[in-house]
Image (cartoon, grey):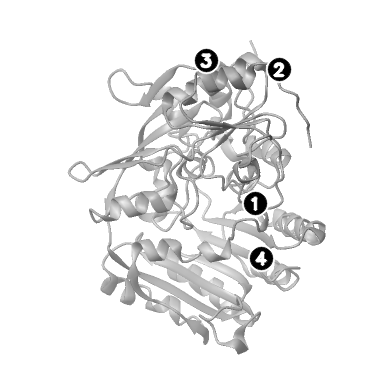
Amino acid sequence: MTQVTLEEGVVERLRADFGARAVTPDDNDYETARAVWNGTVDARPAIVARCKSTADVQSVVRLARQTGLPLAVRGGGHNVAGFGTIDGGIVLDLSPMRSVEVDPAKRLAVVGGGATLGDLDRATQEHGLVAPMGVVSKTGVAGLTLSGGLGWLRRKHGLSIDNLLAAEVVTADGEIRRAGEGKGEDADLLWALRGGGGNFGVVTSFTFQLHPLGPDVWLTFVLYSLDDAHEVLLGQDRLMRAATEEIAPIAVLGRVPAVEDFPAELHHAPFAGVLAVYVGPPAEGESATAALRQLAEPLADLSGAMPWVDAQQLLDADYPDGGRYYWKSANLPALSEQVVDVLVDHANRAPADHSTIDLWFNGGAIAEVAETATAFGNRDALYLVGVEANWENAADDEANVAWARALLADLEPHGSRGIYLNFAGTPEEAAAAVRAGHTESYERLTALKARYDPENLFRHNQNIPPAGP
């Protein structure tokens, strides 16, 4: 880890021009302030700057430019690669900025840059509305959105970025810009934010389009034996090709957790599961998804109607703070017997009981957006394979990382291309994969990076280098 001696007066200058806390290693709450969700990430920043306002953000950005200290931006702190912290630099912590303002008449939400999905869901559900977001409530809205945003609503309402209408952004020069498509707004900056990651500035607020849903939804949650994986995965594939866009399942290969929800005799048993939220009335969802619950003889079926906010928290317990995580991904054009063979083989060989292989069936509204309409690439891929190595002990790091990498290598001959940049492995792997993640939009992104951040101040992310002269 990098040990940094700060230039005399740096912290004092920040605190004098700063409305929130500037936490340094000498402070009692430093260990809490520097911690992020992924336990494999153990960085020691020189300063954790907890911003309460856009003016605070401007002060921190300017300080980073003046001092030359490397800068990391933290929203929810849930980035699996650990981009929300940095050794020896400044962490611009947005977590105090968690406001959510809902306009139910216009179906809009203005969301602070430090808000989590749970913050957003609670506020919007007061009005029977939702924003298309992810599937774990503790995730930060900012990080999830800026690299795409996949969730239960993706086939009906698209990605999070497809519902992003505007944003307030502090760019590398410390100025405030309004990204949007309205009069006086910056349409190029909005285009870049829609999938370009944190490369173009610090987003202090997002404006999202909302959609009616809830308070109750139908959740399909059924586990089958892994021995039936071919029938389950290929059967789901056939059903989904004829299904409505209200259904966007995630098939999961893993092992039954040892929790009260499942009989003790099933604990640690290998499974092939199907999870989906129906985007519509629960009664319709029960009938529309019935065939997904009859693909084989279930080990367990926890399907039923529940509040949307509960459905959004259903997977939270699987991702505790401080657990060890390494996630990779690949897009696939289709599912085949051979691909299922690869997935089942690696599911059986996972070194940790908590690890999963997730198959996101996409298409629908995602694929209806033109490839270059946003900076998000590979919209035509029908499947995203998410490989989640999740474990507890540092001694097991090497085995779990090797497992995830081996699975992705074995998928390559089956047409895998590009990745989902929120599941990009280590920071080094994310940087290497950026071009494949953006495909046709990469050159435009580098040109816009040169406009908004020519010195690459915002580089601790899925980085897009600025185009040269």
> Are the residues tagged 4 and 3 within 8 Å (C-beta)?
no
Assess disc 2: are there few (<14), some (14-19) or many (≥20) residues with their C-alpha within 10 Å of its C-alpha.
few
The label number, if any, that marks residue 362 in the structure image:
none
Residue appearing at x 64%, y 38% in the figure: 85
Residue appearing at x 59%, y 46% in the figure: 79
Which residue is denoted by mark 1 in the rendering? Answer: 38
203 with respect to 330 (left or right): left
Screen quadrant of the N terminus: top right
Secondary structure at badge 2 equals loop
The x and y percentages for residue 291 are 41, 78
Which residue is denoted by mark 4 in the rendering? Answer: 355
Q: Given this view, does label 1 or label 4 mark the residue nearer the observer? A: 1
The x and y percentages for residue 298 are 51, 85
**Amino acid type of disc 1?**
Asn
Secondary structure at badge 3 equals loop
Q: Given this view, does label 4 or label 3 mark the residue nearer the observer? A: 3
**Amino acid type of disc 3?**
Asp
Q: CA distance from mark 4 to mark 3?
A: 42 Å
Which residue is denoted by mark 3 in the rendering? Answer: 173
Q: CA distance from mark 2 to mark 3?
A: 22 Å
Q: Nearer the viewer, residue 427 or 379?
A: 427
Q: CA distance from mark 1 to mark 3?
A: 31 Å
